[in-house]
Image (cartoon, rainbow, N blue to C red):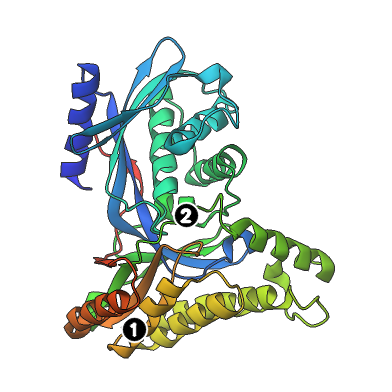
C-alpha cells in the first residue's frame, strides 16, 4: 500500500474534523489488459489493479448524517450533508453521487449509520482507469468497516454495481469493481463474469523486458452520457433475438439485423482473445499477446464503434514506434489506450505519440507505466 497516500488522507481528515479518523480504506484504479465490453455480456475479462488509488479516511457520526469532502493538494471541496435515511436516486449529483449511492445501497443491507468521509486520490479522472469505481469501492469498505459488518468481496462488487447502475445512472457491468476489490500484486485477474470464477494469472512483463504503457488521451468521457448504454441495450436485444440468456452463449451473428451483427461479432471474438491471451501468459509467451491487443482495438473501433480519433492515433502510432500491440481500454469515447512496449523503445513510443497528438491538434497525452498492484483494503 502507498503509505504516503494513507497518511495524507488521515491528515486531511484531522485538518477538517479536528480529530483522527477511525480508519483509512483505499481502492485502486485498473487497467484491463484485454476483454472489453464483455463483462455485461457474461463473458471473460483480464484486468489488473494499478498503483494509483482512492483513499477514504472515515469516522462514524451519531446523527445519521453522511458528510463528504474531497481534498486535492490545497483545494478542498465539500458536498451538502446527507441524511442517510433519506438519500434516494436523483437526489445527489456530481462526484458526491458515487459515495452517496454506496450509502444508499448499504442502507438496503441494514447499514444506516452516519459517517464523515474525507476522500483523496491519484487515479486520473475520465481516463478510463475506473476512478469512479475506485471511489465507490473505497467508500463501501469504509462504511462497512465503520459498521463492523463483514461482507464477501463478491457481495461488495454487486452492491457497487447497483450503486453505479441505479443511483449514478451508468449501466456498467462487474469488471471494474471486481478488479478493484480482487486483483493482487504481480497478477492479472482472469474472471469469468457468469460463474464468478477467478484465476490470478502471474503477470511479470518486466521479466520479459516489456512494459504496459498507459496513454491517457485526456479526452474525458462519462459513461452516463456516452453511447455505452446504447451498446449494452443492443447486446441485450441481440441476445433476445438469438434466444440466449446473454451473448456469452452466442456462436454466430448470422440472421441478426445488420446493425446488431457487429456488436455480437465483437463479443464473440473478444471472449476468444481473452482466453487466448491467458493461455499465452500461462506458457510465458508474453511477446505473442501483442497482436491480440491490436485485434481487440480494431474490433472495438470497427465493430463496437466506441473508439475516437485520439485513441486510434495513440494505438496506431505506438505500434509504428515499436509497440508489440496497442488498444483502447475502458468504456470508450475517450479515456486511455495501452501499449505493450519493449522497455528500450518506451521513450520513442512516448515521443512519437506526443508528436502525433500535436500534429493532429489534440491535447498533449499523459503517459505512465502500469504495474499490477494490490487490490482494495484497509490501510490504517
Q: Quadrant of residue 8?
A: top left
Percent x, y of residue 310: 40, 72
Q: Is residue 310 left or right of residue 106?
A: left
Q: Is residue 40 left or right of residue 368?
A: right
Q: Residue furthest top?
A: 63
Q: Is residue 344 above or below residue 190?
A: below
Q: Is residue 28 above or below residue 327?
A: above
Mark 1 or 2: the one toward you? 1
Residue shown at 28% from the left, 33% from the top: 24
Q: Quadrant of residue 379?
A: top left
Residue shown at 23% from the left, 34% from the top: 75
Q: Is residue 337 above or below residue 79?
A: below
Helix, strand or loop for disc 1: helix
**In the depicted view, which residue is nearer to us: 218 or 321?**
218
C-alpha span from label 1 to label 2: 27 Å
Mark 2 surroundings: few (<14), some (14-19) or many (≥20) residues within 10 A: many
Residue 286 in view in this figure:
no
Residue 172 in view in this figure:
yes
Would you name the residue on which mark 2 appears? 176
Percent x, y of residue 1: 23, 48
Mark 1 and mark 2 residues within 8 Å of each other at the beta carbon: no
Percent x, y of residue 134: 39, 46
**In the depicted view, which residue is nearer to us: 310 or 360?**
360
Location of the C terminus (image quadrant): top left
In the rendered structure, which disc, 1 or 2, sits on the residue that comes first in sequence? 2
Would you name the residue on which mark 1 appears? 317
Residue shown at 35% from the left, 66% from the top: 217
Helix, strand or loop for disc 2: helix
Mark 1 surroundings: few (<14), some (14-19) or many (≥20) residues within 10 A: many
Disc sitting over residue 165 in the figure? none
Amino acid at each position: 500500500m502507498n503509505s504516503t497516500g494513507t497518511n495524507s488522507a488521515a491528515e486531511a481528515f484531522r485538518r477538517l474534523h479536528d480529530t483522527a479518523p477511525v480508519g483509512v480504506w483505499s481502492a485502486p484504479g485498473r487497467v484491463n489488459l484485454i476483454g472489453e465490453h464483455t463483462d455485461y455480456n457474461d463473458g471473460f475479462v483480464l484486468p489488473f489493479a494499478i498503483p494509483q488509488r482512492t483513499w477514504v479516511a472515515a469516522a462514524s457520526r451519531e446523527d445519521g448524517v453522511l458528510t463528504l469532502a474531497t481534498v486535492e493538494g490545497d483545494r478542498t471541496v465539500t458536498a451538502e450533508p446527507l441524511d442517510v435515511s433519506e438519500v434516494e436516486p436523483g437526489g445527489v449529483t456530481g462526484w458526491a453521487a458515487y459515495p452517496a449511492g454506496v450509502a444508499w445501497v448499504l442502507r438496503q443491507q441494514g447499514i444506516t449509520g452516519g459517517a464523515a468521509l474525507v476522500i483523496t486520490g491519484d487515479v486520473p479522472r475520465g481516463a478510463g482507469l475506473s476512478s469512479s469505481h475506485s471511489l465507490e469501492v473505497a467508500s463501501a469498505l469504509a462504511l462497512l468497516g465503520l459498521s463492523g459488518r463483514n461482507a464477501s468481496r463478491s457481495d461488495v462488487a454487486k452492491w457497487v454495481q447497483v450503486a453505479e447502475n441505479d443511483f449514478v445512472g451508468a449501466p456498467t457491468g462487474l469488471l471494474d469493481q471486481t478488479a478493484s476489490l480482487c486483483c493482487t500484486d504481480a497478477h492479472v485477474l482472469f474472471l469469468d463474469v457468469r460463474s464468478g470464477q477467478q484465476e490470478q494469472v502471474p503477470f511479470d512483463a518486466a521479466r520479459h523486458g516489456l512494459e504496459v504503457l498507459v496513454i491517457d488521451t485526456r479526452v474525458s468521457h462519462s459513461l452516463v452520457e456516452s453511447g455505452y448504454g446504447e451498446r449494452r441495450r443492443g447486446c441485450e436485444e441481440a441476445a433476445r433475438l438469438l434466444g440466449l440468456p446473454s451473448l456469452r452463449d452466442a456462436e454466430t451473428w448470422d440472421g441478426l439485423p445488420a446493425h446488431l451483427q457487429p456488436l455480437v461479432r465483437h463479443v464473440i471474438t473478444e471472449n476468444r482473445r481473452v482466453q487466448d491471451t491467458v493461455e499465452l501468459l500461462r506458457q510465458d509467451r508474453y511477446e505473442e499477446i501483442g497482436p491480440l491487443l491490436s485485434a481487440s482495438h480494431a474490433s472495438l473501433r470497427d465493430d463496437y464503434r466506441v473508439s475516437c480519433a485520439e485513441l486510434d492515433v495513440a494505438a496506431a502510432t505506438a505500434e509504428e514506434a515499436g509497440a508489440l500491440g496497442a488498444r483502447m481500454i475502458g468504456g470508450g469515447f475517450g479515456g486511455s489506450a495501452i501499449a505493450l512496449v519493449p522497455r528500450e523503445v518506451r521513450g520513442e513510443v512516448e515521443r512519437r505519440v506526443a508528436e502525433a497528438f500535436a500534429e493532429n491538434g489534440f491535447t498533449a497525452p499523459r503517459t505512465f507505466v502500469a504495474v499490477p498492484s494490490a487490490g482494495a483494503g484497509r490501510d490504517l
